Amino acid sequence: MKENNRIPKQAPDTMRDISSKRIFQDPVLCSQFLRDNMDIPEFKNVQPEDIEDVSERYYPFIGSEFQSDTVKRIHIRNADGSDKEESVYLISLIEHKSGVDYNVSMQILKYMVCIWDDYGKEQERIKEGVTKRKYFKYPAILPIVYYEGAAKWTADMHLRDRIQKGNAFGCYIPDFIYRVVRNHDYTNEELLARGDAISLLMMINKVQTAEDFREFCQSPPEEMDQILKNTSKSIRGTIRDTMYGLLMKMNVPVDEANQYVESVEGCRMGYLFENMEKIDIQEERRKTAEEREKREKIQKESEELKQEVEGLKQEAKDAKREVEGLKQEAEDAKQEAEDAKQEAEDAKQEAEDAKQEIERLKKLLVLHGVPEE
């Protein structure tokens, strides 16, 4: 019976999550990635058997939300190929979304502290008190962000820049720089010239727009087929799943997508490109333009609404000031009325007093025999 290689439909982002994580989980792909992208002599001849996945040791300390990241322990060899008793730790953070994560440096710091603390405890179990010796050294850690987004990476590269008054207190703040490997910094020609599976995956993961896809389809299929022929079945599966995630993102019907990705299993990328006329690139461009127009319209409406709200807020402030003015005028009028009433009361009292004084004087005149006029 023919093996069923059809892939169950999943959300495009989920598929890309899976394929991106598998790049670093696979020791062959990871070793290719280090040889191709790191200009570090110790990684020049790194082999799959030199790479040990230790990611799960740190998830309980870092948190389950970071389980798309991987931590590798890389055993360093001498120039003659013999083993050294040294290791380098590789932290690979996967950020394939279009947005940039500005908290990456703090996330990396958490990993570093966990790795060094765990390493120290491991060495203490081997030889108690060794970490307190002058000669003891902690292993180097290489933090890498594997970034598939089309937008430029704009996050600060130094931890110090993430700290308030980082420059003023620089010597008291732990600092490091991490490495960003951004797919879009390489042309398809540069990637394909490397001739390995990791570069083919990076080419596929570069595709974010219809124009990217058109450029991808113009790449020589024979060179891609040769890479597939020189690749293990498990890695071809990763390439297949990555390609499937791309086709799902482009809204290719599931049956057609399965048919296309089977060409990856058969090392026939040329077949895939021969049938690309079924994928309407112009339609994808139209959808992209419509989405852009929709976003711009929403943004414009949002700005207009924001201005309208600001205008209403200003009118409310003006109305409030006017009400406060009227209230003050009313208070002043009330006070004037109170003052006038008091003056009237005082005048009435004075009149009463004057009347009583007249009556008293009249009585006094009568008493002294002065006739009233």
Image: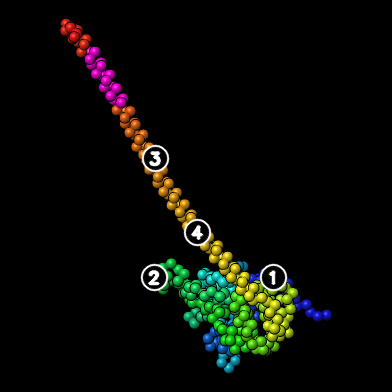
- Picture quadrant where residue 276 is located: bottom right
Of tags 2 and 1, the one toward the viewer is: 1
Of tags 3 and 2, the one toward the viewer is: 3
Q: Is residue 320 shown above or below 15? A: above
Q: Is residue 324 left or right of residue 134?
A: left
37 magenta-colored: no
Q: Is residue 299 visible?
A: yes
Q: Which residues are magenta?
A: 344-360
Of tags 4 and 3, the one toward the viewer is: 4
Are dots 3 and 1 in contact, CB under 8 Å?
Answer: no
Neighbor class of circle 4 (other Cα within 10 Å; few <14, some 14-19, many 20+) is few
The amino acid sitting under disc 2 is Ala
Q: Residue at x 48, y 73 (%)?
A: 156
Residue under label 4: 304
Residue under label 3: 327
Residue under label 1: 10
Are dots 4 and 3 in contact, CB under 8 Å?
Answer: no
Residue 23: x and y, percent? 63, 79
